[in-house]
């Protein structure tokens, strides 16, 4: 008798109708944060005669949009840049977004004041990529860096200080199943 009563209770327990069609309205909004670029260049690598000139240039592959999933679901991106200069010279840094043909799609220029003692860490306003600017970012296959040094006291192999870049990117995704 107790077995029959136990089975009977299972069939009269509380339940609600399940709506399996809810999966049709699935909307995910993941956010990814990653390091974008970093460098730390000592002053003695910028040896010059004191004149203003481009002192370094480099480009790196930017593989973020090679994946179709990422390219199709990205709705916004933000890039943050922080530079620290402990060299007694001003610099400017151009960050170049390049396409397949090495054509510049966009240039972000960051001006870096000369070191004058104390902290010289500069946090630049966040670069936001949405709408048309996001489409330009999605065409980017390489990121170039061009450092220009302003006129000032000559730098030699015994010059002290460093120029450091730290940057990060935050990607906002929207994944919908309809």
Image: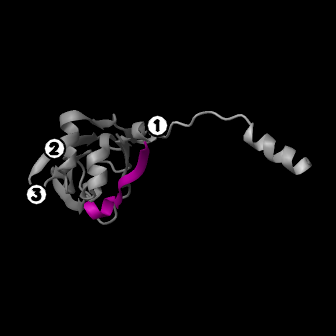
Distance from Cα at disc 2 to Cα at disc 1: 42 Å
Q: Please name the residue shown 34% across and 64% down the image.
A: 158
Instruction: Quickly name the residue at label 3.
Output: 102
Q: Which mark is residue 22?
A: 1
In the image, taking residue 104 as reference, residue 160 lies left or right, namely: right
Provide the secondary structure element on which disc 2 rests. Answer: strand
In the image, taking residue 169 as reference, residue 139 lies left or right, namely: left
In the image, taking residue 10 as reference, residue 28 lies left or right, namely: left
Instruction: Quickly name the residue at label 2.
Output: 106
Distance from Cα at disc 1 to Cα at disc 3: 46 Å
Residue 138 is inside the magenta segment = no
Q: Where does residue 66 sit, x and y in percent of width and height? A: 24, 59
Q: Nearer the viewer, residue 178 or 38?
A: 178
| Residue 37 position (above or below residue 133) | below
Q: Residue furthest bottom?
A: 157
**Label 2 Cα crowd, 10 Å radius (few <14 / some 14-19 / many 20+):** some
Provide the secondary structure element on which disc 3 rests. Answer: loop
Q: Residue furthest right?
A: 1
Question: Residue 11 sits in which quadrant?
Answer: top right
| Residue 95 position (above or below residue 12) | below
Of labels 2 and 1, earlier in sequence is 1
Q: Where does residue 21 sit, x and y in percent of width and height? A: 45, 38
Is any part of residue 44 visible from this angle?
yes
Q: Nearer the viewer, residue 113 or 88?
A: 113
> Closer to us: mark 2 or mark 1?
1
Provide the secondary structure element on which disc 1 rests. Answer: helix
Q: Where does residue 39 sit, x and y in percent of width and height? A: 35, 58
Magenta span: 30-46
Dot 1 and dot 3 residues touching (CB under 8 Å): no
């Amino acid at each position: 008798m107790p077995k029959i009563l136990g089975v009977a209770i299972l069939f009269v327990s509380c339940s609600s109708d399940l709506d399996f069609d809810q999966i049709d309205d699935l909307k995910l909004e993941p956010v990814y944060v990653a390091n974008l670029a970093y460098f730390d260049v000592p002053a003695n690598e910028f040896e010059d005669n004191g004149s203003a000139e481009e002192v370094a240039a480099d480009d790196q592959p930017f593989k973020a949009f090679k994946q179709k999933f990422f390219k199709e679901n990205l709705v916004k991106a933000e890039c943050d840049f922080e530079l620290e200069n402990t060299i007694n010279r001003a610099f400017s840094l151009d960050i170049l977004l390049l396409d397949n043909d090495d054509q510049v799609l966009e240039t972000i220029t960051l001006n870096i004041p000369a070191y004058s003692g104390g902290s010289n860490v500069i946090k630049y306003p966040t670069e936001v990529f949405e709408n048309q600017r996001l489409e330009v970012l999605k065409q980017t296959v390489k990121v170039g860096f061009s450092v220009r040094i302003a006129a000032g006291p000559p730098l030699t192999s015994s010059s002290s200080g460093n120029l450091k870049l730290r940057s990060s990117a935050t990607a906002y995704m929207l994944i919908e199943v309809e």
